Image: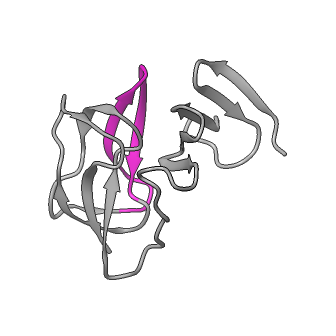
Amino acid sequence: MAPVTRLGPGVYAVARGEEDEAGHNLVYVAGPPGNTWAFSNGRVFRTIEPGRPGEHTARPHVPGSVQLLTSPMPATIVKVLATPGQTVTAGDTLVIVEAMKMELSVRAPFDGVVKAVHCREKEIVQPEQTLVELES
């Protein structure tokens, strides 16, 4: 088990794992028990009690398919960096959202081409709302 340090409300530093550009492994956590969201290094993790609305199974990426990149939690769009037709590399920041006074980057999970962008700056989005369509 990795040591975890609470940095503030909903913000934690984890001692092992992938580090961000500043050498930190920060994890942001939000939501009530049984419907919790965690966000770290451009990836979203969610726990949902069985049988709750919104329960879904994560699907692995299939080469040649389009993957929908969604909002990790209720948030405001701060910056849209992706444009339709843009070629991106895994890890590139496509959209920056703000939730609970924290900026979170939505990153490309694989190399691909931006098929469509479904958000604009200053827009308020809901959890699992599609922000970008990415094609490999």
Residue 103 in the image, given as x and y percentages of width and height: 41, 29
User: Magenta stretch containing residue 135, yes or no?
Assistant: no
Q: Is residue 92 above or below residue 64?
A: above
Look at 41% across and 80% down and name the residue there: 62
**Where, quadrant-wise, is the C terminus in this rendering?**
bottom left
Name the side, left or right, on which 128 lies relative to 45. Answer: left
User: Magenta stretch containing residue 91, yes or no?
Assistant: yes
**Residue numbers of the magenta segment:** 89-108
Describe the colour scheme in one phrase. Answer: one colour
Name the side, left or right, on which 21 lies relative to 15. Answer: left
Look at 84% across and 46% down and name the residue there: 1
Name the side, left or right, on which 111 lies relative to 35. Answer: left
Q: Across the whole image, how many numbered discs are drawn on residues?
A: 0
Residue 114 in the image, given as x and y percentages of width and height: 23, 62
Q: Is residue 11 above or below residue 25?
A: above
Residue farthest to the right? 1
Q: Is residue 69 above or below residue 122?
A: below
Q: Is residue 93 above or below residue 104?
A: below
Q: Nearer the viewer, residue 102 or 9?
A: 9
Look at 76% across and 38% down and name the residue there: 15
Name the magenta segment's main secondary structure.
strand
